[in-house]
Amino acid sequence: MSQPLLMNNALNISIVIPQLNEEESLPELTRWIVEVLTRSQLSFEILYIDDGSTDDSWAVIVRQTEEYPGVVRGIRFQRNYGKSAALNVGFEAARGTIVFTMDADLQDSPDELPGMYKRMLEEQLDILSGWKKKRYDPLSKTIPTRLFNWATRKVSGVHNLHDFNCGLKAYSKKVIKSVEVYGEMHRYIPVLAKW
């Protein structure tokens, strides 16, 4: 397998991945991202934010930084501060032109990254969100999610975003450097960016 393009001044992509107790999925996620983006000939970095894990996630992240030097970086919280705090710190550290967020549980496909990156540039977008059209969650989760998305679209005026809860999103550097994310505000980054 060819080696990933290492970071330089014109870094194409940063991927910010908040994670809590995901030691089992991290090696596979890293391998998958590296394979896809190396094949696409894009320069990138992967930023894992360990949000106070109590398993061996941090040790796994450290090993990933050694296996992929200059590509994988890790930031560790001593306790759990929540996804918004992890994203905020990741956004501050991100160096890419386009900054992606992903969940660490392998439910977001890295195969989507090159296409989303291309669309962001070609259409000069500030935000592009993934959309889980088919959900395999129980009704107790899907119905509240649909209601949340409907209500958020109605109140915010952001009508063209289908899934506010999807972890896979792309942001221009301008957007992530202009928003501060705290509390449970990670769900509302597109709304914050609009204003």
Image (cartoon, rainbow, N blue to C red):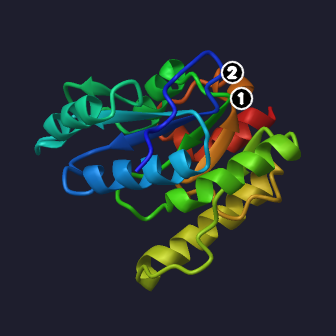
Decide if residue 74 is on the left or right side of residue 2.
left
* Residue at x-position 28% and y-position 50%: 26
- Read off the residue under disc 1: 175
Indicate the amino acid at tag 1.
Val
Q: Secondary structure at mark 2?
A: loop
In depth, the one of 46 and 135 nearer the eye is 46
- In this picture, is 67 found above or below 135? above
From the top left corner, tell me how far across and down residue 107 is, in percent.
Answer: 43, 65
Indicate the amino acid at tag 2.
Ser
Q: Furthest-front residue in view?
A: 2
User: Looking at the image, do the residues carrying marks 2 and 1 touch, with CB atoms under 8 Å apart?
Assistant: yes
Between the C-alphas of marks 2 and 1, the distance is 5 Å
Q: Quadrant of residue 64?
A: top left
* Residue at x-position 55% and y-position 61%: 111
* Residue at x-position 80% and y-position 52%: 158
From the top left corner, tell me how far across and down residue 16 is, in percent.
Answer: 47, 37
- Read off the residue under disc 2: 178
